[in-house]
Amino acid sequence: MSAKTLTLEEAKAANLQVVEDGERGGQAVHDLIVAYQANRRSGTANTKTRGEVRGTGRKMYRQKGTGNARHRTSKVPIYVGGGVAHGPRPRDYSKHVPKKIRKLALRRVLGDCIAGGNIHVVDSFEIPDGKTKSFQAAVKGITEAAKVLVVSSKFDDKTLLAHRNLPGVMCLPASEVSIEELLYHDAIILTTGALEVLAARTN
């Protein structure tokens, strides 16, 4: 399959909105990446307070006459096995990013990828025999990059089956691809159908 490197003029012709100014959209990319990472956090870290630690509430020893400091219970944080002061509690780490900021981040990343010559456009990407060797040969015929992202409007089962054992290669539908995958991979193979979907996402 023949491929050509996507240029800025071709991207504009395909109605793909990108950020050409290198100083615009950097904060949007940062905010969206932080939100992606925060939204993946489970937020289940938990420590027990002195009220939750198992044990008796009986006074440890009498108030006076022992020469020791006065204590009520061994469940306080200063004792081994006691509660934890100011420890982590279950919480929600998720962040919301406005739609305009998401679009700006996608436009900026796509603009950087095009400027770096990382996006290759093909008419279609299919592996009819479903073999990993065929998939690898098809990718190598387009790019020698170690980490490759193949984006299409949709994939058939044979193509998805062929790429599963290839390290560093990922297949994603254009409707689900995020800036994380675009930034992580060294080369991006786009089908013409995926280019139309991305163009709709940036407008």
Image: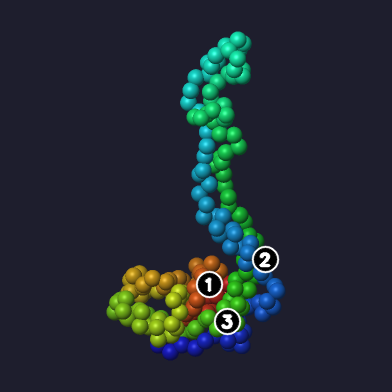
In the rendered image, residue 83, in percent from the top left (x then y), is placed at 54, 31
Distance between the alpha carbons at the discs numbered 2 and 3: 20 Å
Q: Label 3 neighbourhood size at 10 Å, few (<14), some (14-19), many (20+)?
A: few
Q: Residue at x 33, y 74 (%)?
A: 162
Labelled pair 3, 1 in contact (Cβ < 8 Å) = no
Which circle marks residue 27 in the picture?
Answer: 2
Determine the image quadrant of residue 49.
Answer: top right
Which circle marks residue 116 in the picture?
Answer: 3
Q: Amino acid at mark 3?
A: Gly
Distance between the alpha carbons at the discs numbered 1 and 2: 17 Å
Q: Amino acid at mark 1?
A: Leu
Q: Residue at x 54, y 67 (%)?
A: 180
Q: Residue furthest front?
A: 67
Q: Dividing the image into 4 quarters, which one contains the N terminus?
A: bottom left
Residue 203 seen in the figure: no
Residue at numbered disc 1: 182
Which circle marks residue 30 in the picture?
Answer: none
Element class at badge 2: helix
